[in-house]
């Protein structure tokens, strides 16, 4: 059982909102996950349990390696981001630490993008 002021966190991806070639069924699955973040946050409000998601840039992981052309997707994210470098697991971890801490006590039911800004800029090159 979670204590009062606990935090639940999950990981999503921009494929929940945009068509990402080769991401296939994962896009609708991530859209459902993001919707569940909002509904669960609402249902847990009286217990003071926060629920949020991090929408991460494409990162090379064991999971991403099974997606066809994952290297192309990762490079596309890099070419579309606004920070000029790859987003890494430490970027995600720092944001996760923040969202699980009291520093984010007023954030609930949100999708936080940690993608270098690629969600606001589509580069079709």
Image (cartoon, rainbow, N blue to C red):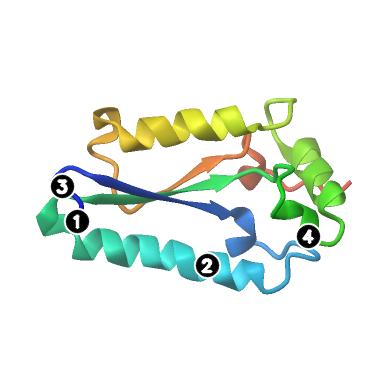
Mark 2 → mark 1, Cα distance in angstroms: 27 Å
**Residues marked 1 and 3 touching at CB (< 8 Å):** yes
Which residue does the numbered mark 3 point to in the structure image? 3
Measuring from the top left, give residue 49's x and y in whole percent. 21, 50
Q: Residue at x 74, y 25 (%)?
A: 84
Q: Is residue 23 above or below residue 25?
A: above
98 horizontally vs 82: left or right: left
Residue placed under numbered mark 2 in the picture: 31
Q: CA distance from mark 4 to mark 3?
A: 36 Å
Q: Earlier in the sequence, mark 4 or mark 1?
A: 1
Measured in 3D between alpha carbons, the distance from the residue under mark 4 to the one under mark 1, in whole angstroms, is 34 Å
* Residue that numbered label 4 is attached to: 66
Q: Earlier in the sequence, mark 2 or mark 4?
A: 2
Provide the secondary structure element on which disc 2 rests: helix
CA–CA distance in space, label 1 to label 3: 7 Å
The location of residue 55, given as percent across then percent down, is 54, 48
Task: Give how far across and how far down residue 10 sits, in percent.
Answer: 45, 52
Question: On the rendered structure, is 101 left or right of 34?
Answer: left
Viewer-side residue, 93 vs 35: 93
- Residue furthest to the left in view is 46
Taking 86 as reference, is 112 above or below it?
below
Pointer 2 or 1: first along the chain? 1
Residue annotated with mark 1: 1
């Amino acid at each position: 059982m979670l204590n009062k002021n606990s935090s639940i966190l999950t990981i999503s991806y921009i494929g929940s909102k945009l068509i990402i070639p080769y991401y296939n069924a994962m896009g609708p699955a991530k859209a459902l996950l993001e919707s569940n973040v909002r509904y669960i946050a609402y249902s847990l409000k009286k217990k003071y349990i926060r629920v949020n998601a991090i929408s991460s840039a494409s990162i090379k992981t064991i999971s991403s390696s099974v997606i066809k052309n994952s290297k192309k997707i990762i490079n596309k994210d890099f070419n579309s981001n606004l920070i000029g470098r790859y987003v890494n697991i430490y970027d995600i971890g720092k944001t996760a630490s923040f969202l699980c801490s009291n520093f984010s006590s007023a954030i609930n039911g949100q999708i936080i993008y940690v993608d270098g800004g690629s969600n606001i800029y589509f580069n079709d090159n």
